[in-house]
Image (tube, grey):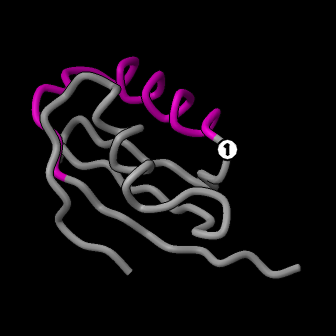
Amino acid sequence: MEKNLKEMRLKAEGIVCTGCAEDMENILLDKEGIEEATVSFIDDFIEVKYDADVIDRKNVFLAVRKLGFPVKIISES
């Protein structure tokens, strides 16, 4: 069965190191429905690819917010 993949790119503030970014990626990947997560502390962004049939955009956003950083959605597709 083909997945209904969507992407969300968010601006985040306060990510200070690669270790933090890697931890954040692993936390997001543990969430059911999130297929890919990329966190860049250099550019202050988070990209998430998710299966919209498993998790909706609101819960993807909330999962990112629970990481503890102020975020806002830059783009979605």
Quadrant showing the C terminus = bottom left
**Where on the picture, by quarter, is residue 53?**
bottom right
Magenta residue span: 11-31
Q: Is mark 1 on a helix, strand or loop?
A: loop
Task: Locate residue 56, reporting x and y percent.
Answer: 49, 61
Q: How many marks?
A: 1
Name the residue furthest right.
1
**Where on the picture, by quarter, is residue 3?**
bottom right
Task: Locate residue 11, reporting x and y percent.
Answer: 16, 51
Q: Does the magenta stretch include residue 23?
A: yes
Q: Which residue is drawn at 32% across and 74% down?
A: 76
| Residue on which disc 1 sits | 32
Q: Which residue is drawn at 19% across and 39% down?
A: 42
Task: Locate residue 15, reporting x and y percent.
Answer: 20, 27
Q: Does the magenta stretch include residue 27?
A: yes
Compared with 66, 47 (above or below) is below
In the drawing, does residue 55 fall left or right of residue 24?
right
Quadrant showing the N terminus = bottom right
Kind of residue sitting beneath label 1 = Glu
Residue 28 or residue 21, whichever sits in front? 28
Compared with 8, 60 (above or below) is above
Which class describes the residues within 10 Å of circle 1: few (<14), some (14-19), or many (20+)?
A: few
In the drawing, does residue 66 fall left or right of residue 4?
left
